[in-house]
Amino acid sequence: MKLYNTLSKKKEEFVPLEEGKVRMYVCGPTVYNFIHIGNARPMIIFDTVRRYFEYKGYDVNYVSNFTDVDDKIIKRAAEEGVTAEEISKRYIEECKRDMEGMNVKPATTHPLATNEIGGMIEMIRTLIEKGYAYEKNGTVYFRTRQFKDYGKLSHKNLDDLRSGERSLLVTGEDEKEDPLDFVLWKPKKEGEPSWESPWSHGRPGWHIECSEMSKKYLGEQIDIHAGGEDLVFPHHENEIAQSEAANGREFAKYWMHNAFLNIDNRKMSKSLGNFRTVREISAQYDLQILRFFMLSAHYRSPLNFSAELMEASKSGLERIVNAADNIKFLMENAKTEGMTQEEIEAYKKTDAFVEDFERAMEDDFNTADAVASVFELVKYGNTTAGPGSSKEYLQKLLERLIRLTDVLGLIVDRKEEILDAEIEKLIEERQAARKAKDFARADAIRGELLEKGIILKDTREGVQWKRA
């Protein structure tokens, strides 16, 4: 299995630190509002990566945090006249609801930054003792130049940063030994949540949070650290500096980053008025469609969100779901149980689709090609399964389709929906009208059912229906 490592800027063979196990940390959202579709991309992508490792038999310890103390949370709390804790708790629950809609599995652990302050203070203390950090007027800074490998992830040069980059410069610049030094701990301002520390009543810097949470729940060294490409610098670069300086060993072997998401070929921003939350999308589309859309391109490729592409994703997902529904319908009416020799041979041919799927996923998690393999399996199933198929053959086809789509987090085996008595009665009445050649009445009932969101499909095996 090969994955692209941002650290080396090339694809590398995945070799776990511990055989059969994967330790993986993914930076989670700052919870001050509903998550937007930019947040959704890494959630879906790295959930799929996790699912594939599990499919291959790995025991995955998957940690993804919630940043629940931050300037944006404090600002939102002040605007609403409530506590920062109230804001963060509210939006953690809303985030979990959206994640469930996108079929993102809960992490092994979802740590909250505010629960891990003690560990952060200890890590900062260690950095001070080792000479990597210093305190000035209650603020603790990291000595960036003291860490010789600074810039190895983003491939930035410290001298270039000093002359051209302003993104690292923070308030209190005149206190710092070097303008590139970044904050590990800062004193509280009026009305802000704070914690007691050896340096001041205050709160941690953003970067130290992930370093400590990763260490606590995964250990000093992990297999994979992942997130959006906007986190490469300075967040992940600073995580490496803190973690490796404090722990004295390599932090993460592999660094994975997904590319940006645009809206109608423009960068998503509130100022442009094209800021879209997952909750807003869910009012228009099943979030399974959003997931399918996210997987339709390679995770390192920029992805453009548009109504046209979402409609195409809706059609693509329906094609897979309809194939599964058709197989289930055929199974209910199958006349024979065991497979014929011809079916045994036909089923063996589906091995090729599984191999193509795995080949795509093991080439840096190419979900676009993996989806194409699923479509090939669907096409094959549609042409080889029919009224005369055995129940065993149909069952094996369905199981294979479900197994592959489950890796992608796509739900194709929908639970049986129960029609209420009125609709059941209308379907029976329509069947009777057709039998009596009262086609006008049959058509009227079809229209009536359509208004209730029920689509009928007449087949040789009987009437099939689905919700619109």
Image (tube, rainbow, N blue to C red):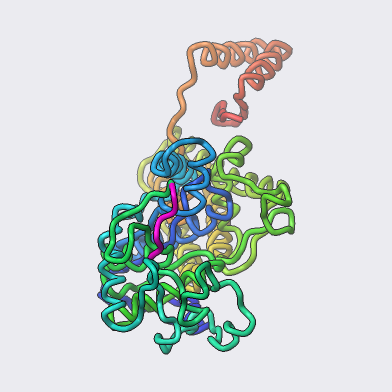
Q: Position of residue 428 (x, y in %)?
A: 55, 14
Identified at 26% across, 60% down, the residue is: 118
Residue 270: % across, % down: 67, 50
Asked if residue 227 is positioned above or below residue 66 in the image, the reply reads below
- Residue 104: x, y in percent? 44, 50
Residue in the image at 56% along x and 51% along y? 292
Quadrant into which the C terminus falls: top right
Q: Is residue 188 magenta?
A: yes
Please indicate whether residue 168 sits to the left or right of residue 200 in the image: right
Query: Picture coordinates of residue 14 (x, y %)?
Result: 39, 77
Q: Which residues are magenta?
A: 185-190
Q: Quadrant of residue 50?
A: bottom left
Name the residue: 39% across, 43% down.
85
Q: Is residue 98 above or below residue 203?
A: above
Report the residue at 45% width, 33% height from top.
333
Q: Per the image, is 251 magenta?
A: no
Front-lying residue, 57 or 106: 106
Residue 224 shown left or right of residue 450 in the figure: left
Asked if residue 20 lies left or right of residue 269, the reply is left
- Number of labelled discs? 0
The answer to whether any part of residue 343 appears in the image is: no
User: Relative to 168, is 325 above or below?
Assistant: above
Question: Which quarter of the image is occupied by the N terminus?
Answer: bottom left
Whether residue 261 is visible to the viewer of this picture, yes or no, is yes
